[in-house]
Amino acid sequence: VTQDADLVARCLRDDPAAWDALVARYSRYVYAIIVQAFRLSDNDAEDAYQDVFLRVYDRLGSLRDPEALRPWIAQLTRRVCLDRLSSAGREEPTEAVEPPGAEQGVHDLDEAFDVHEALDALPGSCREILDRFFTRDESYRTIGEALQLPAGTIASRISRCLVKLREELEGRSGAVLGSGGKREHE
Amino acid sequence: MKTGDVPALALAEVLDRFARYVPGPGGGAAAGVVAALAASLVAKAAHASRGSWADAAGVVAQASLLRDRCVKLADADARAFAAALSALEGEDATLADRLDHAAEVPLQIADAAADVAALAAVAAESCEGAFRADSATAAMFAEAAARAAARLVEINLTVTEADARLRQAQRFVAAAAASAARALDAGR
């Protein structure tokens, strides 16, 4: 049972801690879709964010495949954003279309989510060295000093950690496919 | 337009900028570009060795990041250099700050170039034989970039003998030189 399937099962049993965990797990993802992919204004973004989680709360029971929680939430978020766009500044709501790049934006956010999850599954030493090099832009020397490792070994350590990260990502995509995993959108 | 014209024009434009524009990009930016070019050679050697080298993809990823870092630093150096020159020509109250910043950027270039040299040495030791010479070339370019950038730190008007940046710059050059020697040994 995956983390998402477990969360869904617990939420459907009205476990308050599970709802908190679900919101914590997906709050940044939802917000990123709203502001990065759909570029809603600050006010609209705040309302849309609330609306998404209200709909998740109301409709979670209709989700047929608990493994597909993330694409389901993404689809809900897209619909909420489209509703906002179609009613923005109009007395009569009109059919809205997704802004250019929105689909690619959601795809990129999905990839980032996967990488983030895979990173979380790596040993702490790998997480730290990859974060320092790729996110914090630290040099081999700075990383070596901080982690008390010989600077000459840092490049090879990063490469080995990237291999582990790729294995983790491949394992995850294999697990999704292995679970019958077509991604269900409601 | 024939295939291949676009890269040729782009390179010509870059070279023109170095040759014609004053203040424009100077030695620090050139060091950044050379280090970026070295990182590209490392990426190529690793990419071509994916079939025989387990760490190759990881080295490609690191080389790509280092290349981007060096390009950004080259741009930052051109800006810092222009700002410092402009301050030197006028009576600018921010002169000391601008000069100080103009020393900071080449120090970062020397640091990044030392990393490129280190990665080039790793590539030279493990990539496929046909690409060892490219990796060794990359290491020598990176060492030269580190040396040039360190020299710019040294001659900056705000850097004194006691300045810690001077010793840092020298350490980066020593590290880059050691990596280049490793890469050359591996290529023999």
Image (cartoon, rainbow, N blue to C red):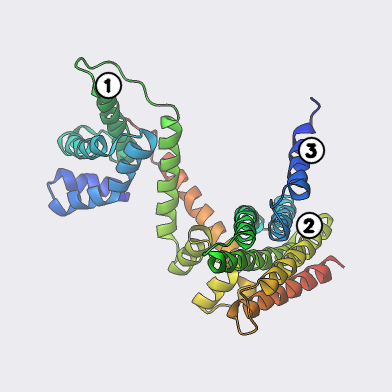
- Residue B166: name its quadrant: bottom right
Q: Which numbered marker is on residue B8?
A: 3
Q: Which numbered marker is on residue B3?
A: none
Amino acid found under the numbered disc labelled 1? Ser
Q: Which numbered marker is on residue A86?
A: 1
Few, some or many residues within 10 Å of mark 2 (<14, 14–19, 20+): some
* Circles 2 and 3 on the same subunit: yes
Q: Earlier in the sequence, mark 2 or mark 3?
A: 3
Amino acid found under the numbered disc labelled 2? Glu
* Residue holding disc 2: B128
Nearer-the-camera pick, B142 or B160: B160
Camera-near label (2 vs 3) is: 3
Confirm or deny contact between disc 3 and disc 1 (CB under 8 A): no
Chain under disc 2: B
Quick one: which residue is furthest to the bottom in this view? B162
Rounded to the nearest angstrom, the CA distance separating label 1 from label 2 is 57 Å
Percent coordinates x, y for residue A16 in the rendering: 13, 51
Few, some or many residues within 10 Å of mark 1 (<14, 14–19, 20+): some
- The answer to whether residue B70 is left or right of residue A42 is right
- The answer to whether residue A32 is left or right of residue A16 is right
Q: Can you see residue B175?
A: yes
Residue under the image location 35 percent in, 33 percent down: A38
Mark 1 lies on a secondary structure that is helix
- Residue A111: name its quadrant: top left
Residue under the image location 53 percent in, 53 percent down: A166
Percent coordinates x, y for residue A101 in the rendering: 45, 30
